[in-house]
Amino acid sequence: MATLNENTEFDPKNDDLNKFKENGTDEFLTTNQGVRINDNQNSLKSGERGATLLEDFILREKITHFDHERIPERIVHARGAAAHGFFQVYEPMAKYTKAGFLNDPDRRTPVFARFSTVAGSRGSTDLARDVRGFSVKFYTEEGNYDLVGNNMPVFFIQDAIKFPDLIHAVKPEPHNEIPQAASAHDTFWDFISLMPESTHMIMWLMSDRAIPRSLRMMEGFGVHTFRLINEAGEAYFVKFHWKPLLGVHSVLWDEALQISGKDPDFHRRDLWEAIENGFFPEWELGMQIIPEADEHRFDFDLLDPTKLVPEELVPVMKVGKMTLNRNPDNYFAETEQVAFHPGHLVPGIDFTNDPLLQGRLFSYTDTQLSRLGSPNFHEIPINRSINTVHNNQRDGHMRQMINKGKTSYDPNSMGGGCPFQAQAAQGGFTSYAERVDGKKIRGRSASFMDHFSQAALFYNSQSEVEKEHIVEAFSFELGKVELESIRERMIGILTEVDLQLATQVADNLGLEVPKEPQHPLNHGVPADADPIDYQPTKKKPNIGRSEALSMANTIKDSINSRQIAILADVEVDMDNLMAMKTALENVGGVCKIIAPKLGYLHGMSGEKLKIDMNFKTGASVFFDAVYVAGGTKNENRLLTNPDAIAFVNEAYRHGKPIAVEGDTVPFLELTMIKGTSTVSASQIDHLADQGILVLPVGASTVGKTAVDFILAIAQHRFWNRV
Ligand code: HDE
């Protein structure tokens, strides 16, 4: 395991940030003008009980600064958490791109990565059903490169002009500002039910991908097709992926609802604590590379952001790794003020004509102007490039740079013609000379009109349990919709994806499902257009199923940083408890002792162990697995503790691995776990298939049970419980 802050001495971005860091330790309190303050407790008054004097510059300065502490939150992606780290490429990618950071395996490029929810305000819950933003700023030697993606590979709309409509629909309704951080309301589903192009994305949003277990266990996607350009000027299309080394895992909706109340900071706390404890999150950067000549090889348009390129058609090449190893020093200065932009490019990477991407290129600078308040937002420490900046841009609010010399124009002779333009060979950015030829029109290509094939591909690729969760999610969300006509329209759209899905959801909503797929009308049609030109089509997709789309096929080989609750009361069998705890911790498990009250657990031979949480502060939804400690007195106490019984029942219902000591069987008989009263070998095996491990009474070692428990935790969840 790497140690905290390892490598920061090689981090040029951290060196740059260090120049701006402040630390009040052993220092005097001062005003912003540097004057030492003598009394920070009382304002200046005319007499002890007199009115406060306007002259009190210390009071005025303090209050004025406080009054202006807030800036507008991001219009979308307001709630986020971020961390520093580095990226390193495995092999030079010169065949495809000249980007420096993708060509030198010895180069550690500093990064700052921010993860976010989309719809909620800054103070909303981390566990909302929502898309997650996945933004990475690479501080490369050639300037900043931002990969501003999401945890889902497609998007709701095909054209940027629809973005304000989409966001207005999903944000709290304008008359009463309800609901916060939730899509389960009329305006969202009204819009979606009229926009068949959203269907594929909606399938992702209703899947468990929208409620991740951890920000560290999400995939990331660049969404749009981008271009890579090599030294010879040749271009390749590329789709960017981030693949987490911990695999892709989610929580259940019931857990998400509970966590939202018990710990709305669950994801940001998880990221923070993992990094503080040396469990540095890692993702491999993946690329699907497509030669220009293959642009029209697929049954969808590469420029259409509602489509993904199935990994079975174009495999994902793992080209490098990002490691996050340092938490920010100050949330506002770094996480809040960081400004990402899909248009922050370096030579070797370029755009395509994806109409969603093209609109984004305008939006991101524009939004920083109102959010951060000045065109000088690039001078804020977290946004500064590590390459020095020289140009003729001047002045503006809060300008930091002191530009010397008389000339701020180009060409000039008085400044020796400086700063110079760079030739391409000197690293000057040149846009890819794509041939563009066409009439000026407002419209959409016919190649964008298949809105259902990939929605069906996604649904068909899910495991049975994932499909059940999708049905439940639709039933919940549409159940919250008040207008029946909206629900009916959505059922119509679902018939295009899968009739059984539509039937199950309709049944839960008390609606009839049409016998045949019901072709939904596309209402996103221009006033003078022939609606026929805009009606959705459905093609037969290249493939019927893509294993990569199901989380059931994710990596399940580690319990690194997984949280394990150890339930106990009073007097425990400390030998077994410690042996199990050590076995789990040796492979990266994080154990917390939970007991009815804080203090210490006592071993039967007088040993002591600190209790981490009581049943009021620790809940089963915070954990990935549960171990019930043994010991006669312990078991007797747990028997009469409804909190302990509820804890185990909940973990059981949520499919989590549970290990128990054989002498706690009478306690287990009070829970939903049945069949433990006579723990014969065959029953133990049967329970083990369901992720329930029983340490036989009198076992001299936890050995095999610990090994099985570890394997079970790595599996994440067991869905085969009845
Ligand atoms: Fe964004 N988006 N977006 N978006 N987006 C913003 O920029 C926008 C889109 C994404 O951690 C805003 O600085 C438009 C797709 C992330 O700071 C804003 C359109 C994808 C973040 C904006 C899109 C994203 C943003 C708000 C449709 C995935 C958070 C604050 C054309 C590829 C960045 C800000 C962070 C943030 C506009 C669609 C990802 C308003 C107009 C598609 C991860 O500029």
Image (cartoon, rainbow, N blue to C red):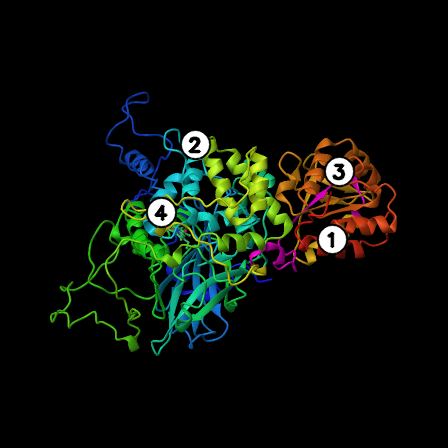
Residue furthest to the top in view is 49
- Given contact means CB atoms under 8 Å apart, are the residues at marks 1 and 2 in contact? no
Foreground tag (1 vs 2): 2
Amino acid, disc 2: Ile
Disc 4: residue Cβ within 8 A of ligand 1's nearest atom: yes
Q: Which residues are magenta?
A: 549-574
How packed is label 4: few (under 14 Cα within 10 Å), some, or many (20 or more)?
Answer: some
Query: Would residue 618 appear left or right of 239 to someone viewing this image?
Result: right
Q: Mark 3: which secondary structure?
A: loop
Q: Position of residue 426 (x, y in %)?
A: 29, 76
Query: Would residue 402 appear left or right of 350 to someone viewing this image?
Result: left
Amino acid, disc 3: Met
**Residue located beneath label 1 in the image:** 709
Foreground tag (1 vs 4): 4
**Residue located beneath label 4 in the image:** 163
In this view, the residue in front, 361 or 609, is: 361
**Residue located beneath label 2 in the image:** 178
Q: Mark 2: which secondary structure?
A: loop
Q: Mark 4: which secondary structure?
A: helix
Q: Mark 1: which secondary structure?
A: helix
Residue furthest to the front in view is 515
Picture quarter containing residue 144?
bottom left
Does the rendering let one see residue 314?
yes
Q: Is residue 573 magenta?
A: yes
Query: Would residue 161 appear left or right of 702 to someone viewing this image?
Result: left
Q: Which mark is residue 672?
A: 3
